[in-house]
Image (tube, helix red, strand yellow):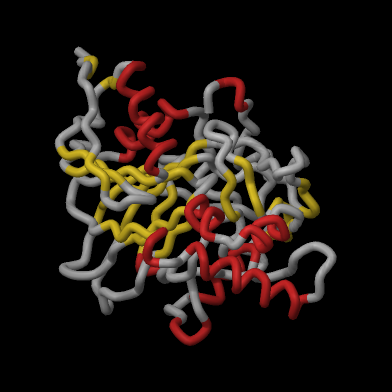
């Protein structure tokens, strides 16, 4: 018989700008609407939530939990899912380390609104996940630079493999790159995105925006401006460092964060499973929505309606 959890949640802040954690909340249970609403409220406030001792040990449990926040995406637009679980993407050190700052799948028209990561295999040391608040970064910008950023658009693409730097490639990197880019995507997104639930503004850039350019500017100008803006996102004040434990899940708002997985665990195995929640089309400061340039991602994710409470 399924049990309904009725409790007032008490999250502990991990930093002033991003991150909070809770220990012992049983995510394998049928969470009440009130509990889910409290988690959503905490996510809006803290951007990244760490659930320790979460009793969530299977892909089915993770899928069930993530689906409480909206319809799920497939595992990835081009990369294969875990066998028998179309919504679950293995994030495995055998395939390389995602040690470049990025927001998940921003090369499609409607990137995921939220991502969940579940610990599966952990190294004896290292292997943390860093998550940064792009809202904090936007607030840090001088007013003149903030006003300039409000007007910019950047083209995001999957036409490179951010998780396998050339100088640190694993065996089979060329094949993985071929799979990752087997369908090419390009999408123009606002550099400053307005969060549909909180109204906050955040810098919406990251690794997938680095490959091409800011609309209307040269590659050189684009790289310089993106590098300048990116430096605000990764300021230590805007970053929380999540240490992994067994039986742990992390939920972060993909609309207003970036994340990074340091390759600091030598050759030890590290595996997390990822499930993402379908998102809306990003909107800029002037109300203009993102536009797809190349690639149809409708097989990967439906476009959700913000009015549906996402």
User: Is 121 left or right of 182, judged from the image as shown?
Assistant: left
Q: Residue 272: give x, y in percent of width and height.
A: 33, 54
Whether residue 211 is visible, yes or no, is yes
* Residue that extends furthest to the right in the rendered view of this protein: 216
Q: Residue 89: give x, y in percent of width and height.
A: 44, 50
Number of residue marks? 0
Give the image quarter of residue 218: bottom right
In this view of the protein, which residue sits in the foreground, 87 or 285? 285
Give the image quarter of residue 116: top left
Does residue 148 lie above or below 257 as drawn? below
Image quadrant in which the N terminus is located: top left
Residue visible at 33% across and 37% down in the picture: 62
Q: Residue 269: give x, y in percent of width and height.
A: 26, 68
* Residue that extends furthest to the top in the rendered view of this protein: 1
Q: Residue 170: give x, y in percent of width and height.
A: 43, 78
Whether residue 184 is visible, yes or no, is no
Residue visible at 57% across and 62% down in the picture: 206
User: Is 8 left or right of 298, judged from the image as shown?
Assistant: left
In this view of the protein, which residue sits in the foreground, 80 or 197? 197
Residue visible at 78% across and 46% down in the picture: 291
Give the image quarter of residue 188: bottom right
* Residue that extends furthest to the front in the rendered view of this protein: 143
């Amino acid at each position: 018989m399924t049990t309904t959890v009725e409790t007032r949640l008490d999250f502990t802040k991990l930093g002033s700008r991003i991150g909070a954690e809770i220990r012992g909340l049983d995510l394998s249970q049928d969470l009440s609407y009130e509990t889910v609403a409290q988690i959503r409220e905490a996510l809006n406030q803290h951007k990244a939530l760490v659930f320790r001792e979460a009793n969530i040990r299977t892909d089915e449990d993770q899928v069930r939990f993530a689906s409480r926040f909206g319809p799920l995406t497939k595992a990835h637009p081009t990369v294969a899912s875990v066998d028998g679980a179309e919504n679950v993407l293995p994030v495995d050190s055998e395939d390389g380390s995602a040690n470049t700052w990025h927001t998940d799948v921003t090369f499609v028209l409607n990137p995921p609104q939220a991502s969940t990561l579940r610990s599966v295999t952990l190294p004896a040391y290292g292997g943390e996940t860093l998550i940064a608040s792009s809202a904090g970064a936007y607030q840090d910008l001088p007013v003149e630079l903030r006003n300039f950023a409000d007007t910019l658009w950047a083209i995001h693409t999957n036409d490179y493999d951010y998780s396998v730097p050339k100088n640190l490639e694993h065996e089979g990197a060329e094949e993985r790159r071929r799979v990752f880019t087997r369908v090419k995507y390009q999408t123009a997104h606002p550099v400053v995105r307005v969060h549909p639930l909180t109204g906050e503004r955040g810098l919406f850039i990251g690794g997938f925006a680095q490959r091409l350019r800011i609309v209307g500017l040269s590659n050189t100008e684009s790289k310089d401006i993106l590098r300048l803006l990116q430096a605000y996102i990764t300021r230590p004040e805007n970053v929380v460092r999540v240490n992994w434990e067994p039986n742990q899940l992390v939920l972060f708002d993909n609309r207003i964060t970036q994340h990074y997985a340091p390759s600091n665990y030598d050759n030890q195995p590290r595996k997390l499973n990822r499930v993402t929640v379908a998102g809306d089309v990003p909107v800029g400061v002037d109300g203009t929505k993102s536009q797809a340039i190349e690639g149809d991602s409708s097989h990967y994710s439906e476009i959700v309606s913000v009015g549906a409470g996402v």
